[in-house]
Image (cartoon, coloured by chain):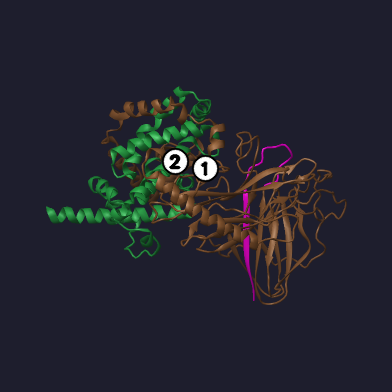
Chain colours: A brown, B green
Amino acid sequence: MTQRISCAQCRDMLPVYIAGRLSQDEHLLIEQHLIDCPQCQRYGEYTRTLNEAFQEADSLLPAKSRATPIWNGISSKLATPAKDATPEKEQTKGVLVSMSFDELPSTPPSNEEIVPEPISRWRQVGRYPLIAIAVIVILIVGSLWYVGAQRNKASNLTSGNSSPSTSTKGPIIITTDHSTYAPADAINATIKNTLTSAIEVPDNGDCPPLSIQREDNGQWNSPQEASCITTAIFRPAKPLASQQTLSVTVRPIQITPGHGFVFLPGKYRLELQYTQNNNDVSSATVVYSQTFNVQGTLPNVTDGPTNTPDPGQQNPIPSGTPGSITLNGCLTQQAPPNMPSTDVVATEQGVAGEPTSTDFTHQVNLTNGQVLQVRLKANVNWHMTITDPDGVLTLQTIPGAYSKEHASCIWRFTTNKPGTAQLTFTGGMVCPPNSMCPDIAMLTRFAVTVK
Amino acid sequence: MDTEDRSLIARIAQKEQGALQCLYEKYQSRLYGYLWRQLNGDRSDVEDALQEIFLAIWRTAWKYRGEAQVITWIFQIAHFHTMHILYKQRLSDKIPLSDESDEENLQVEYLNSSQEETILDRLALNEALRLLTPKHREALELSFYHGFSQEEVAKILNMPIGTVKSRISYARRALSRAMSAVASEEEASS
């Protein structure tokens, strides 16, 4: 069967096609589409003309004639030991922000943090005569932030076995509910934007903007391990407004053989990456992070057999860690009890015919008395949060059952009365032990309206 | 191509200067043009930025995670550097066309695709490209010239893909408007 692409897909890919960066298969897909689509052919001409205009502009630049002197400049700096920072050196002299905006207030460098991205200007700061003033200003502002954060910390003390931990690093305050956790604990954190302007939290697809890294031999980002070993679902659809506080729960998603989903004991950091907009041209990625510790003994878990019976079979019910690979990421293998037939099925793609907003929220419209089935693909350790102040929905047992037929985890809800509720499902990929596991955060929301 | 680039990055991570020079020779021309346009043709800034970008690659090659193509990663670094320099220069006040609020509250005459395509005239196009704001020109350039997918542009600019799509869409409309303006000026002067 011949695969086809839509005009929108074709137009998205046309610049990549013209630049010759598509795979052979993708290239063929575009060519096949162009044969049949005069509109996209015209768009292709437009794309090519723009491309050539840039090429023409480039051809007028003096780049080639100056290439050698520029390289000589680079080469001479490589030879200077002070500039030749090894990873270890970066670790010890790192700073907090990924870009050194020395004109931005309250981004003081920290001796404890690590450079997540290249810092070049920061290293040149000593060259400039005004830097002494800048440093003093930064220190003063940093001190003010520190005092503010300490107050925040004091006000957030809980009755837990350890104190909450609060970032004191700048305008974004990250507070964890404790500073020390047990391996299987979830970490509850709040993120407050204390700036007078909104911040945009980018979603770059690699790591979510809020990620966790574990210290490994003095390095946070060991080349041998994934950059974000666990995932927090924190993808606000809108910029984080001034003074706005968001709560987020962070759970481990990588399975540790014999122990289920745990954080291995050690030192971690919770890192937030965001874009600070200053009339756009000065927008920058800034990283704030907060460290915490995981201590204690790993729980012992014995996973059951790897066979996965259909929910229709009542027995046997494999044992296993909820959310583990044994259970295909689902909470249980047990089939839900007899239920009235499902009226509406909602999946990651939403409900057929219903709109989906840009913030991963699918609309689900029900009539009172109908049964809703949420069917989300397996091999994700889904975690459900339900917001239903009016008691519109009733979750039927057994939630999160695995359906072999659909290769999905299934939740069923009956409707009680008219009203609205929101179901939020978050999770990370579940992979076999000792396998490379993509660090993918999943988020699906359903805005349910019962009439 | 990316396999070759990844090999170079691995060698740079081992502090092999020759590998950095290979990477430099391969991409300096593309980066130079990008920096030239983003930094408003300030040669000193462009050359300084180009040096800083390759020094950053030298220092941080060991951190390259392989999640994006090498060229995407390099442009990400380049973008950060231009942002930093532009911030310091506060060029926004000097840019004649549109700003973020324009993008959010778009009240322009929408051109359909056929109109857009027919008004493409090379001279007017080059002039119009110069009239775009750096952020719009950058989005267009990364996509239409360097051939990055919208997902890759989002990665480079560190923003949601939806924002990239709207930015490119707006940039195309702004380009059309600018070309119309250029054409009108040319008519008036002839």
Residue A114, horizontal then vertical, whole percent: 56, 41
A273 horizontally vs A382: left or right: left
Pointer 2: what residue?
A122
Q: Chain of mark 1?
A: A
Q: Mark 1 or mark 2, which is nearer the start of the sequence?
A: 1
Residue A444, horizontal then vertical, whole percent: 62, 58
Q: Are marks 2 and 1 on the same chain?
A: yes
| Kind of residue at badge 2 | Trp
Pointer 1: what residue?
A95
A333 horizontally vs B67: left or right: right
Quadrant of the image containing the C terminus of chain A: bottom right
Give the Cα distance between marks 2 and 1. Answer: 9 Å
Examine the rendered structure and indicate whether residue A243 appears above or below residue B5: below
Inspect the magenta stretch and tell me whether residue B151 lies in it.
no
The residue segment tinted magenta is: A429-451
In which quarter of the view is residue B93 placed? bottom left
| Kind of residue at badge 1 | Val
Residues at marks 2 and 1 touching, judged by CB atoms closer than 8 Å: yes
A396 horizontally vs A18: left or right: right
Which of the labelled discs sits on residue B116, or is there none? Answer: none
